[in-house]
Amino acid sequence: MSDSTTLLSLESLRKCFGDLEVLRGIDLGVQEQEFVFIIGPSGSGKSTLLRCCNRLEEPTSGRIVFDGRDILHKDVNINQVRQQIGMVFQSFNLYPHMSALGNVSLALKKMMKLNKVRAEQRGMEALEAVGLSDKARAYPNELSGGQQQRVAIARAVALEPKLMLFDEPTSALDPELVGSVLEVMRSLRDQGMTMVVVSHEMAFAREAANRVIFMDEGEILEQGEPERLFGAPEPRRTREFLSRISRH
């Protein structure tokens, strides 16, 4: 990763659901072209953190600065911001009555106001990038789970975002289908896409990430390069989590 600037900055970010404090003052900066992997036990606030980054969840307090703008400001057009922050979920959220190409090109027509020909051209380019150009006319029920997730990635990538968020993108997949999705994410990394990933794919984190962050109970307890964090974690809770994961 070359010298780069901060694309996303979270400052003293807190999120409460009633009396439950899920995020407890998160400070985090993500550099352009950085691949950040967030790990931690269930309920540690990882997915909530991701969802706050594009305001699918509204933070209780703190700041989120993306591409130089405070996106919590009342004058911000959040739909424009979300064009620049792609998100891929655990569930694929594809429209069952639309083909793969239809799913990918819909946002291009609705959000970017491209005409049908240009939207479908861009959609085909995105499907080709995830290795699914031959499935453009197939419907979701004709695709495997891994293929559906790759369509979901293509749908986000087609908008040419500056940042991609992945929330457990492989957890709903059969084990033999996981590799094809990770390969697409690896390709995006190699093309310089800035990514923040929440996942339990530890081997992939160790091999592909620039930085790994360990969260527990709404806080960042430790972060660093994968080799150091996996090889010599410092806090006891990090060590306990990694030892539990390695037994599975």
Image (cartoon, grey):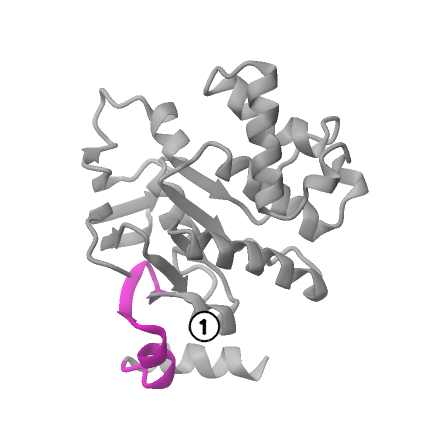
Are there few (<14), some (14-19), or many (20+) residues within 10 Å of tag 1? few
Magenta span covers which residues?
A: 214-234
The residue singled out by tag 1 in the image is 207
Q: Of 238 and 54, which appears nearest the observer?
A: 54
Q: Position of residue 134 (x, y in %)?
A: 74, 41
Q: Which corner quadrant of the image does residue 55 belong to?
A: top left
Q: Residue type at mark 1: give it.
A: Glu
Q: Of 35 and 88, which appears nearest the observer?
A: 35
Residue 43 vertical placement versus 135 (above, below): below
Q: The N terminus is located in which quarter?
A: bottom left
x 64%, y 58%: residue? 180
x 49%, y 61%: residue? 199
Residue 122 vertical placement versus 195 (above, below): above
Whether residue 18 is visible, yes or no, is: no
Q: Helix or strand or loop: what does disc 1 sit on?
A: helix
Residue 212 vertical placement versus 9 (above, below): below
Q: Position of residue 126 (x, y in %)?
A: 56, 38
